[in-house]
Amino acid sequence: MSTITIKKLSGEDLFKNIISHSKEYGFIFQSSEIYDGLSAVYDYGQMGAELKKNLRDYWWKAMVQLNENIVGIDAAIFMHPTTWKASGHVDAFSDPLIDNKDSKKRYRADVLIEEHVAKIEAKIEKEVEKAKSRFENFDETMFRSTNPRVVENQKKIDEINARFKAALEEDKLDEVKQIIIDLEITCPVSGTRNWTDVRQFNLMFNTQLGSVSEEASTIYLRPETAQGIFVNFLNVQKTGRMKIPFGIAQTGKAFRNEIVARQFIFRMREFEQMEMQFFVKPGSDLQWYEQWKKTRMAWHNSLGFPESKYRFHDHIKLAHYANAACDIEFEFPFGFKELEGIHSRTDFDLRNHEKFSGKKLQYFDPEDNENYIPYVVETSIGLDRLFLATMSQAYMEEMLEDGSSRVVLKIPPFLAPYKVAVLPLVKKDGLPEKAREIMNQLKLDHLCIYEEKDSIGKRYRRMDAIGTPLCITIDHQSLEDNMVTLRDRDTMQQERVSIDALMQLVEAKVSIRAQLQKLM
Ligand code: ATP
């Protein structure tokens, strides 16, 4: 077996390479590229659309198909404008922004402070790692509570967090600016501290409904999919005869006029969310919150990426609707960032919709013989961020024993765009016909790709680059012994197998069934 060495890339290089690879192989294109693009809006190409669909399906199956008490809906993007009054988005869905007067660049004030805190956290972690490698029987807890530098830095973090939390809670934007000044935070572009005042900026896009201007009313493009679930809570509960606790899941587009939209598909103005609202009896909400934290982390781990790539991050400032909230963060090439949010939303949304609509949104509990507004635990993940996380883990540049190199996308096989490539060794002698026969069988179950152009080596490299887990090569011998070569993307190992065994071998490799079983 040949040895493979993985090339180590810095986060920045890795990220750049992922972006160009995504474009070169039809995963992601800049939106309206021929018009020089539209900022923070992206299109998924032929490969990207498949991977995205497979990720969405895996989430849907894990949520809806495996849980008898969760059902899925597909609500409209446009909603009655009062929805967004009731949800608090008209008044409070804004980010504090600040401009640097020299570079004219705009930043989220909260992000500037959080990044400053993250730098101090990184110093602490470096100190801990250094000590860990020096001492045997290292007592980490003791070290964290006694090492003077660690203690000092932790104290700084706690002070900043407390001050920042108070400023946000009391809506004191001048104090937020003062924190930025006191921490001596500079603009990464101009390097200066010449800041404007901090202002709140609402992130919702609006448009007009109706063709006649006098009749037209302002409506919003939904900034989250969750409200489509809340306004349908009773419809679904009654028609589906759902009993609490139960969940409603939904995937779909959301729109936010993000102030700082950089980092490729991490922060977009049009993106897709996969959300699930779990309706529970008041009082059991925090227990369910803990349960969903575990369930969602287990789902992430089931993708097979290293567990060290994920961590929980508790919110210091809770959103207007939450009594507990955390993020599942993923280590993207640019560091740990939010991938999914888990929020205990209390009865905030249903209670407000009840108030604003004048319609009762209560559940009659047959066991306790009482009516109540359920509490809600929400899990909310960005499909595009999940896509980026998958690409960041899958993308590898490898040096092979013979001195050549390859780029391979080690996408978990059940998620790969194409599952199998069917490749006749040459374009003649009856090999294409034999290959077509195999293709016609396999494509009933799986998305397959047929390729007969270029040398077999080149075709293998191309399949590696788009993450196809299996290649089947048909050669002259195949016509005689009914055997083909099956090549594995990750190990590059090849074995001769019978054509009759192919269906089973492919299924074993790419089965979503086996994957779902891990979650039960
Ligand atoms: P952030 O703090 O990064 O702005 P958020 O806390 O506002 O995110 P939520 O409102 O909790 O995000 O949305 C749930 C999920 O939707 C996020 O975990 C993220 O994966 C995704 N998401 C939110 N905003 C964007 C965006 N602009 N582009 C892509 N995905 C997004």
Image (cartoon, rainbow, N blue to C red):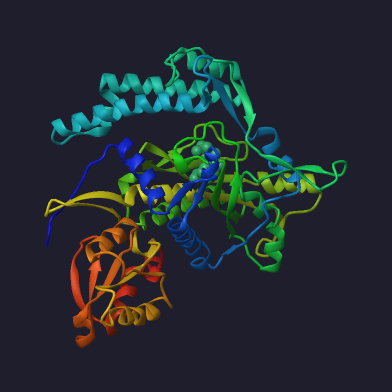
Q: Return the residue nearer the eye: 456 or 181.
A: 456
Q: Position of residue 431 (x, y in %)?
A: 28, 79
Spot occupied by residue 279 in the image (x, y as percentages of width and height): 61, 55
Do we see residue 342 in this rendering? no
Q: Nearer the viewer, residue 148 or 474?
A: 474
Q: Establish if 416 lies above or below 132.
A: below
Q: Is residue 111 above or below residue 441?
A: above
- Give residue 366's quadrant in the image: bottom right
List x then y, in percent, for residue 131.
19, 29
Left or right of 390? Residue 423 is left
How many numbered markers are drawn? 0
Question: What residue is rendered at 11% in x and 54% in y?
Answer: 402
Quarter of the image where the N terminus is located: bottom left
Horizontal side, residue 370 vs residue 110: left or right: right
Residue 314 visible, this orientation: yes
Front position in the image: 283 or 447: 447
Q: Residue at x 50, y 32 (%)?
A: 316
In the image, residue 38 lies at what x, y percent?
55, 40
Quarter the C terminus occupies: bottom left
Could you tell whether 432 is left or right of 328 in the image? left
Residue at 63%, 29% in the rendered image: 201
Query: For the view shown, which residue lies furthest in the bottom direction?
Result: 480
Residue that appears at 42% across and 27% down: 115
